[in-house]
Image (cartoon, rainbow, N blue to C red):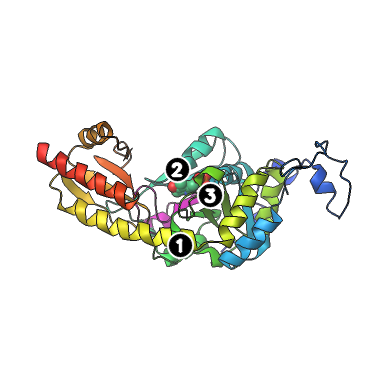
């Protein structure tokens, strides 16, 4: 297993040597009455000042909520920003590579492509599971980051925590475990393991279960040494003041999202049952997320029919192992009822 010292040797040389931009709020952190250092407009309203570049108050709330150390938290403008920063910090363009499961979330390969970093795909089996023995033999020297996604988008299934731990112990680079949908799942989060496994990074987001995709708030849990590296390369004020404020209030009153999560999970069961009864449905993949991947006889026809009826679902039929698959997000109870009714109509006319 990688130790903390060898972690830092994975960082790109130019990033190791980088002198980061030092913002006004970086250089002055004491108390003062009069702020004439940052060229802000002095007339006071909620947002005339630059926000805290290290989001201290928000990190304190997240630390309590997830039972982790504040120093292990990094916050980004959505988890998409964190994916990009990790690739930028660790992967030498045109030289290093990342590994993505196939099929999985599309941003890993887009961020890699933007950074001119090769993606090596590890194919999941026909039930979207990882063959552990073969992945342990798949790793190659230029691989710097292994992206895992659990529950996986678009398939909805989880990776067993002990398999994640095994991959961390065997892989010579960073393992990024994307838990965007973990709050809809019965599988245990690995967030509390980040202190024990130096090369494990866990990604979470406010965009899904917490109901705040619009504020753009992603969080990552990792060794404090890696947080320091990302702090060096992030835009100084990457998380804006309004977002920090709203995120704190979401975490301090989280009964609402807890209720919504249970509702979404029971709606998932309902939709799952209905889908299985339809004769044009080939496979309903079991999901631990807030969406269901469904293989049908003719994805194109179904997609167009639903769209004509005002319902948009996500086509996934061009993805590896997803022939004739669509991905349906769980909506409100009423929305799901309308969907179910339209699906029955589709069955009647086809
Ligand atoms: C939706 C999603 C995200 C969320 O990204 P944000 O930038 O935080 O909105 C991250 N990972 C996966 C797998 C997702 O499906």
At a point 83% along the width and 53% down the height, the residue shown is 29
Judge from the rendering whether residue 210 lies leftward or rightward of residue 199; answer left or right: left
Q: Against 58, is 335 above or below?
A: above
The kind of secondary structure the magenta stretch mainly shows is: loop
Q: Which residues fall within the magenta stretch?
A: 134-158
Judging depth in this view, the residue of 178 and 6 nearest the camera is 178
Q: Which residue is mark 2?
A: 120
Label of residue 322 in the image? none
Residue nearest the viewer, comparing 139 with 184: 184
State the image coordinates of residue 103 (x, y, percent, origin top left): 37, 45
Q: Nearer the viewer, mark 1 or mark 2?
A: 1
Give left or right: position of 277 versus 286. left
Check disc 2 and report its element: helix, strand or loop.
strand
Q: Report crowding for label 1: few under 14, some 14 to 19, many 20 or more residues within 10 A (C-alpha).
A: some
Dividing the picture into quarters, in which one does residue 182 lie?
bottom left
Residue at the disc numbered 3: 145
């Amino acid at each position: 297993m990688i130790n903390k010292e060898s972690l830092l040797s994975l960082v790109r040389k130019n990033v190791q040597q980088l002198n980061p931009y030092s913002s006004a709020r970086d250089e002055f952190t004491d108390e003062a009455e009069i702020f004439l250092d940052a060229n802000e407009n002095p007339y006071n309203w909620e947002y005339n000042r630059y926000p805290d570049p290290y989001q201290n108050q928000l990190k304190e709330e997240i630390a309590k909520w997830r039972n982790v150390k504040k120093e292990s938290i990094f916050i980004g403008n959505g988890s998409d920003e964190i994916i990009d920063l990790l690739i930028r910090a660790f992967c030498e363009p045109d030289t290093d590579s990342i590994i993505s499961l196939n099929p999985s979330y599309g941003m890993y390969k887009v961020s890699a492509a933007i950074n001119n970093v090769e993606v090596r795909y590890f194919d999941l089996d026909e039930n979207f599971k990882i063959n552990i023995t073969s992945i342990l033999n798949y790793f190659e020297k230029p691989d710097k980051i292994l992206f895992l996604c659990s529950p996986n988008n678009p398939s909805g299934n989880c990776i067993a925590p002990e398999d994640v731990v095994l991959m961390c112990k065997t892989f010579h680079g960073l393992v990024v475990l994307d838990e965007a949908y973990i709050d809809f799942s019965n599988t245990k989060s690995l967030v509390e393991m980040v202190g024990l496994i130096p090369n494990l990074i866990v990604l979470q987001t406010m965009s899904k279960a917490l109901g705040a995709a619009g504020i753009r708030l992603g969080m990552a849990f990792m060794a404090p040494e890696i947080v320091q590296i990302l702090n060096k390369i992030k835009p100084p004020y990457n998380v804006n003041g309004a977002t920090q404020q709203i995120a704190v209030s979401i975490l301090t009153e989280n009964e609402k999202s807890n209720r919504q999560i249970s509702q979404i999970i029971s709606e998932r069961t309902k939709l799952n049952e209905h889908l299985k009864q339809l004769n044009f449905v080939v496979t309903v993949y079991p999901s631990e997320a807030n969406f269901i991947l469904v293989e049908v006889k003719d994805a194109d026809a179904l997609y167009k029919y639903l769209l004509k009826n005002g319902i948009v679902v996500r086509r996934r039929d061009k993805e590896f192992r997803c022939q004739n698959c669509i991905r349906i997000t769980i909506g409100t109870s009423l929305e799901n009822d309308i969907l179910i009714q339209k699906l029955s109509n589709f069955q009647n006319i086809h």
